[in-house]
Amino acid sequence: MSKPECMYEPQNYVVTIFYRKGVMMNPKRYENLFMQIRKHDCTTLMEIGVWNGNHAMKMIKAAQVFGEVSYYGFDLFEMCTAEIVKKEFAKKPPSMDTVSKLLEATGESINLYRGQSKDTVKDFIRKCIQVDFIFIDGGHSQDTVKTDWQNVQQLMNKNTVVIFDDYFYNSKEHECFGCKNIIDNLDKEKYSKEFLMPVDIAEDGLHISMVKVMRK
């Protein structure tokens, strides 16, 4: 297929289409999570936006080759309402017990937190736990992403890998969602950023990529 027109930093990129006739297929960009964990030997994982736990399960398995894994997951779980789903451009997660049982089968240290990430992550910061890898994929409103990023920065050292999902860069309709505003306005003196391939393209033409951020 020909490369679609879009305006964002990478000029050469790989695309995948993950919708067929309105049915969601398997987005390829999530492979970046497991690749980056292996690349940086990460064993202490944090995820904002656990949803059904499937990505968490794969991230934990990717990290197990380096030793014991500690996973910290944050979501609303049963507290998520239809109103929040709409406001945050999100998906309703299963119960926390359901996800906990799935992840505990890995035999690793599983720690789940239920509630608004603006509160639960702030509380987590007080525990002073060093985190190797952070995946931000919770609420998608700009206010929520901004707050998550402000909190996450307090957990980062020079080796911490932060992955943002949902960089939407070609849609006026979605410009109030996702991490684009955060990424486009990062302090270049403090942080490096890398757009990760491939870019997934939805049926409506929306281009979605992940972005890796680290301290300089």
Image (cartoon, grey):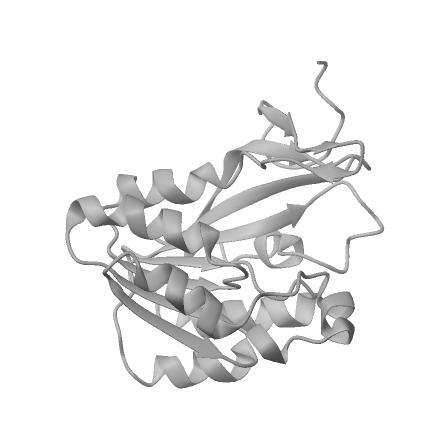
Is residue 76 visible in the rendered image? The answer is: no
Q: Determine whether, in the image, residue 37 is placed left or right of residue 122.
A: left
Residue at x 57%, y 66% (from the top left corner): 94
What is the x, y in percent for residue 101? 38, 66
What is the quadrant of residue 124 in the picture? bottom left
> Quick check: 83 above or below 213?
below
What is the x, y in percent for residue 57? 38, 52
Is residue 131 visible in the rendered image? The answer is: yes
Residue at x 70%, y 66% (from the top left corner): 141
> Quick check: 60 above or below 128?
above
Q: Residue furthest top?
A: 1
What is the x, y in percent for residue 11? 61, 26
Number of numbered discs present?
Answer: 0
What is the x, y in percent for residue 100? 40, 68
Q: Residue furthest right?
A: 173
Residues 49 and 162: in front is 49
Residue at x 79%, y 38% (from the top left corner): 22
Q: Determine whether, in the image, residue 69 is placed left or right of residue 47.
A: left
Residue at x 26%, y 74% (from the top left corner): 129
